[in-house]
Amino acid sequence: MLACLLDRPDNRVSLRDLPFPRLNKGDALVKMEACGICGTDLEKISGQLGPGGILGHEVTGTIQKAPENSQYRIGDRVVAHHHVPCYECTTCQKGDHTLCEQFKRTNIDPCGLAESFRVPKYNVARGALILLPKELSFEEGAMIEPTACCIRAIDKTNLHETDNVLVVGLGPTGLTQVQLLRKKTSGKIIGTDIIEARLEIGAKLGADKTLNPQAEKIPDVVVKMTGDGADLALVATGDEKALDQAFASIRRGGRVLLFGAPAVGAHYQLDTSTLFSRGNSLITSYSCTEAEMQEAVRQISDKLLDVRGLISDRFKLKEADKALEHARSSKTAIKTMVTA
Ligand SMILES: [Zn+2]
Ligand SMILES: [Zn+2]
């Protein structure tokens, strides 16, 4: 079967013919139908998140071999979540499930960008194989995981219903966050990106204003629109320079949420005296759990947000290498989708 892998040591993408994964008792085999390309896939290739990694984790498919004695049947349409927490350790008990030591050790095999993949019993037993409601297409299903990550992030911000929010970076997650925020605040939502096509979509999806930082001084515009700055700045890019824009745009007492994954070893210089005297805070959010996956299924099924409109480009699995390159270099791509 065909699979798109990241070869060490030079992080080269290759399409290879692999044997089907060997199943252990309780595992599921899923035929891939759609898999979204995530910013973290691109960062794995450029080595910013460290060498190696598994490509494709926003993935849906149909069950080819169901786990024994389970609720699943051959042909069931599913979305498979790649990481699951143990739900037992002290970190899990404190609610920080995505920080559980087991979380990143769990995964699908060999990856989401493969003709078929194995979902281990460990994941299946912890609810990471979710049946897709029939009203959702496989492509919409592939948007569940990134949407779930956005839901978890916004939950961490204690958003108030009148908060003014700046969203830095209008890629697929920034655009999802704009939509989720629109349902939760009557305050201003301001989005920024250097790609004009993304600014247009951001305005359509609910941002009151979208700005290009190469053309305008973002903090000045934000302060003008909000009176004293944004209550919250949500940084949906891994570029730590975006934090400058975020900190300069929030009010006294405002907070910054770091959502995009920074490169390994990235440093950011923070003026701690200003941080302290202005009472600002920095929050982070990493990944999501089954609770947010289920919530994303509900919101997308109920048409509370448009994820279909974020899918800009489609490639077949045999062109997965081209899909990754397109997602990296295109000036128009929002979400690039790979299909069977
Ligand atoms: Zn992702
Ligand atoms: Zn745990």
Image (tube, helix red, strand yellow):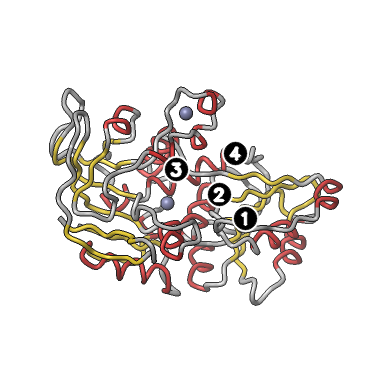
Residue 42 point in image, percent of width and height: 42, 62
Which three-letter amino acid code belongs to the residue tagged 2? Arg
The mark that comes first in sequence, 1 or 4, is: 4
Q: Nearer the viewer, mark 4 or mark 2?
A: 4
Residue farthest along the front direction in this orientation: 9
Which residue is at a point 69% across and 62% down the rendered structure image?
245
The mark that comes first in sequence, 2 or 3, is: 3
The mark that comes first in sequence, 3 or 4, is: 3
Is disc 4 surrounded by few (<14), some (14 to 19) or many (20+) residues within 10 Å? few
Residue in the foreground of this view, choosing between 55 and 75: 55
Is disc 3 surrounded by few (<14), some (14 to 19) or many (20+) residues within 10 Å? many
Element at label 2: helix
Q: Nearer the viewer, mark 2 or mark 3?
A: 3
Q: Quadrant of residue 319?
A: bottom left
Question: Circle 2 sits on which residue?
Answer: 182
Which three-letter amino acid code belongs to the residue tagged 1? Ile
Question: Circle 1 sits on which residue?
Answer: 189
Question: Circle 3 sits on which residue?
Answer: 148
Which three-letter amino acid code belongs to the residue tagged 3? Ala
Which residue is at a point 15% across and 51% down the rendered structure image?
19
